[in-house]
């Protein structure tokens, strides 16, 4: 009878095989983890890309139909001294002046007769906490980004949140037509809260007031907002928007910017008659 000589694995061989298998398993696990993480990041990036695009479209649609624009934040405005124009950073409300408004020494708008500074009221959503905000500046005095087709990278053309950490964009726009052909004007305030990293939206019938909806339920337009800023070109009646989102979990980010032309004339500057 033939004897089968099968000794099996020695202890050293077994240890070597286990070591090789462990290295292989670690490599596979690492590869799978990398693929899963990459797929999750790509999915989140696609999600925030879609969200950024939808948010940008929502804001740009309102701007295109704008009949009036007010901005509360910080920007550079022009002042002229001895025939020399320079730009300085200020915080306030940027508006199109009334025909009776005059300018103070610092460029701020004064009410008719120069008896006091122009102000714009801001209120909490729901009509509570009405507060006057100022000073007001001529929106056409803000430093223009100058281009017709693309935003500028010049920091001094950006309109950013003020010391409160908020930036408000108030737009009156034509939202519908009445039976007689007249436009229905809706007022919408976009609030950017830099601390909370959120954009809020609040709509009302036409109003002169800016509405802060950052504490109201159901008003969040977009979350994970890393940056939101504006630029204007009064001569071309256009506003540039820069919006950047960043996922708080995966750090996936997406930035979108562009120039929105306003259909109506003289929305960002007073009409001067020839």
Image (spheres, helix red, strand yellow):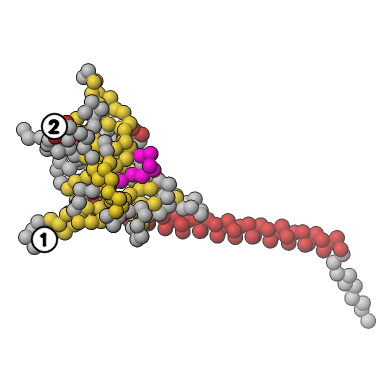
Q: Is residue 240 magenta?
A: no
**Span of residues in magenta:** 162-171
Instruction: Give the answer, above or below, for where 22 lies relative to 143.
Output: below
Please state if 125 lies on the left or on the right of 11 as rendered: left
Quick one: quadrant of the C terminus? top left
Q: Earlier in the sequence, mark 1 or mark 2?
A: 2
Residue at (89% x, 76% y) in the render:
4
Q: Nearer the viewer, residue 171 or 155?
A: 171
- Seen at 23% across and 20% down, the residue is 81
Q: Position of residue 239 (x, y in %)?
A: 26, 43
Q: Which residue is mark 1?
A: 178
Question: For the N terminus, which image quadrant?
Answer: bottom right
Relative to 187, residue 94 above or below:
above
209 or 32, which lies in front?
A: 209
In this view, the mark in front (1 or 2): 2
Q: Provide residue 78's location: percent of width, then percent of height.
A: 25, 29
- Closer-to-camera residue (51/248): 248
Q: Are marks 1 and 2 in contact (CB under 8 Å)?
A: no
Q: Which residue position is annotated with label 2?
A: 113
Q: Position of residue 13 (x, y in %)?
A: 83, 62
What secondary structure is found at the residue carrying circle 2? helix
Residue 148 can be seen, yes or no = no
Q: Residue furthest top?
A: 82
In the image: residue 144, left or right of residue 244: left
**Residue 126 as seen in the image, left or right of residue 46:** left
């Amino acid at each position: 009878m033939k004897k089968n000589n099968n000794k099996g694995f020695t202890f050293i061989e077994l240890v070597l095989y286990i070591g090789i298998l462990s290295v292989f398993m670690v490599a596979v696990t690492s590869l799978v983890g990398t693929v899963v993480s990459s797929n999750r990041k790509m999915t989140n990036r696609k999600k925030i890309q879609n969200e950024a695009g939808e948010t940008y479209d929502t804001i740009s649609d309102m701007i295109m139909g704008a009949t009036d624009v007010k901005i509360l934040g910080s920007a550079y405005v022009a002042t002229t001294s001895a025939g020399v124009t320079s730009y300085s950073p200020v915080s306030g409300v940027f508006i199109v002046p009334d025909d009776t408004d005059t300018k103070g020494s610092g460029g701020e708008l004064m009410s008719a007769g120069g008896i006091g500074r122009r102000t714009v009221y801001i209120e909490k959503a729901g009509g509570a906490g009405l507060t006057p905000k100022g000073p007001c500046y001529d929106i056409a005095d803000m430093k223009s980004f100058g281009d017709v087709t693309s935003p500028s990278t010049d920091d001094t053309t950006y309109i950013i949140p003020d010391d409160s950490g908020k930036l408000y964009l108030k737009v009156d726009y034509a939202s519908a037509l009445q039976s007689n052909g007249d436009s229905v004007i809706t007022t919408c305030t976009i609030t950017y809260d830099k601390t909370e990293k959120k954009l809020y939206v609040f709509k009302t019938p036409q109003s002169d007031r800016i509405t802060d909806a950052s504490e109201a339920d159901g008003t969040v337009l977009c979350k994970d907002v890393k940056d939101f800023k504006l630029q204007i070109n009064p001569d071309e009646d256009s506003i540039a928007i820069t919006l950047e989102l960043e996922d708080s979990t995966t750090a996936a980010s997406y930035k979108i910017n562009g120039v929105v032309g306003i259909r109506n004339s003289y929305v960002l500057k007073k009409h001067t008659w020839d």
